[in-house]
Amino acid sequence: MGWNSWNWFADHVTQEDVKRAADLLVSSGMRDAGYVYVNIDDTWQGKRDQNGVLHANEKFPDMKALADYVHSKGLKLGIYSSPGDQTCARYEGSLGHEQQDADLYASWGIDFLKYDLCSLRRKMLADAPGNKPKQNEIMHDAYEKMHQALLKTGRPMVYSLCQYGYDAVWQWGPEVGGNMWRTTEDISADFNSIALIGRQQAGLAKYAGPGHWNDPDMLEVGNGQLTADENRLHMGMWAMLAAPLLAGNNLTKLTPEVSAILTNREVIAIDQDPLGKPAERIFAEGPIEIWARPLADGGRAVAVINFGEDENFLRGITLHLKEAGVDGSMTARDVWAGKDLGTIDEHDRFSVKRHCILLLRFRKAG
Ligand code: GLA
């Protein structure tokens, strides 16, 4: 869990923005809710010197001092690069300098690396035209190369693979040391993007677990024109998916409403549940889906989500308790409402409004 600069600052991010984000993670209570990584995304890079050593650009005058500052706040610092010669924003990538870059990150005190395919894709296509298996091999090797470089530094760093799910990365991500891997193209701060990416996670639960997670991309909670319902749906669904929670909003404009959504302890507890089993989709009919996941205490989290547009949609839905693994003796709590509901009968019907999520936590009796 943490915060990443891209979704809000994009290519405008500066050292000052990152320091302020660190301050605000602490003062807002987000750090204490679990958001500890402060991740600088693309556009921090400058040029390499004659020895090939990369320097940060003028917007990041002192990375080591920045890392010290972030660490002094009880936080960790993340950074970004690409296995290609250029990042997606066309800054310097790590191709041919993997060990040098990994050593540089370690010397600064970096704790997390997001490694974004970007221009390596062009190279894959150029080096092995029409040969998909060979292209994929180039990609695997590139991710493995940085994995080995990171290990060689001796400094533990979370290794975040970002290649938009190509070649079913969930099947080979752990082999190249990935602690998390993006499963889709980029998210954006609009409901359709969030709904599309959320729904694309169906079938992927079995590939994730402690230490290696599916990453449906960073949170847009608090960005764009998302309503409170949409922010709750986004956060609630990402918690069901056991997704890495990397907030991507402007913390200098954090409203009490957005703060309450991002720091809801019961929602975070579902996301971070120690069993580490993401939800699977157990029911889908039109815009309505039900997702369920088992929890370490023997209970279940169940989410009923309405992705539809119809304002007047009021047809009651049963919870499909059996498929969700809920037995009749379990008691339910409406997590976003903070309300205990007691036991639920399999015939009980629930209505979920447009762009809303009903997030329930079931506990064993006694
Ligand atoms: C890609 C990634 C994004 C972001 C940008 C930065 O699009 O998927 O998350 O890192 O690059 O250029």
Image (cartoon, rainbow, N blue to C red):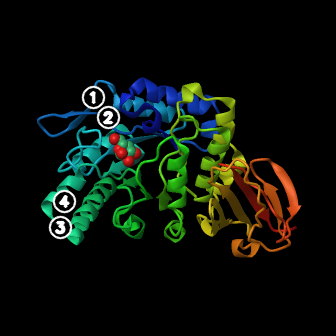
Q: Is mark 2 within 8 Å of ligand 1?
A: yes
Q: Which residue is mark 3?
A: 130
Q: Nearer the viewer, mark 4 or mark 2?
A: 4
Spatial separation of the CA atoms under disc 2 and disc 1: 8 Å
Q: Quadrant of residue 296?
A: bottom right
Q: Quadrant of residue 270?
A: bottom right
Q: Secondary structure at mark 3?
A: loop
Residue 286 location in percent, x, y?
62, 63
Spatial separation of the CA atoms under disc 4 and disc 2: 25 Å
Q: Earlier in the sequence, mark 4 or mark 2?
A: 2
On residue 173, the disc is none
Q: Nearer the viewer, mark 1 or mark 4?
A: 4
Q: Is residue 106 visible?
A: no
Q: Earlier in the sequence, mark 1 or mark 4?
A: 1
Q: Earlier in the sequence, mark 3 or mark 4?
A: 4
Q: Secondary structure at mark 4?
A: helix
Q: Which residue is mark 2?
A: 43
Name the side, left or right, on which 270 lies relative to 12.
right
Spatial separation of the CA atoms under disc 3 and disc 4: 7 Å
Q: Are marks 3 and 2 in contact (CB under 8 Å)?
A: no
Q: Is residue 210 visible?
A: yes
Q: Earlier in the sequence, mark 3 or mark 2?
A: 2
Q: What amino acid is labelled 3 in the image?
A: Gly
Q: What amino acid is labelled 1 in the image?
A: Asn
Q: Secondary structure at mark 2?
A: loop
Residue 302 location in percent, x, y?
70, 62
Q: Which residue is mark 1?
A: 57
Closest to the observer, 50 or 16 = 16
Q: Which residue is mark 4?
A: 125
- Identify the residue at image location x=74%, y=76%: 322
Q: Is mark 4 within 8 Å of ligand 1?
A: no
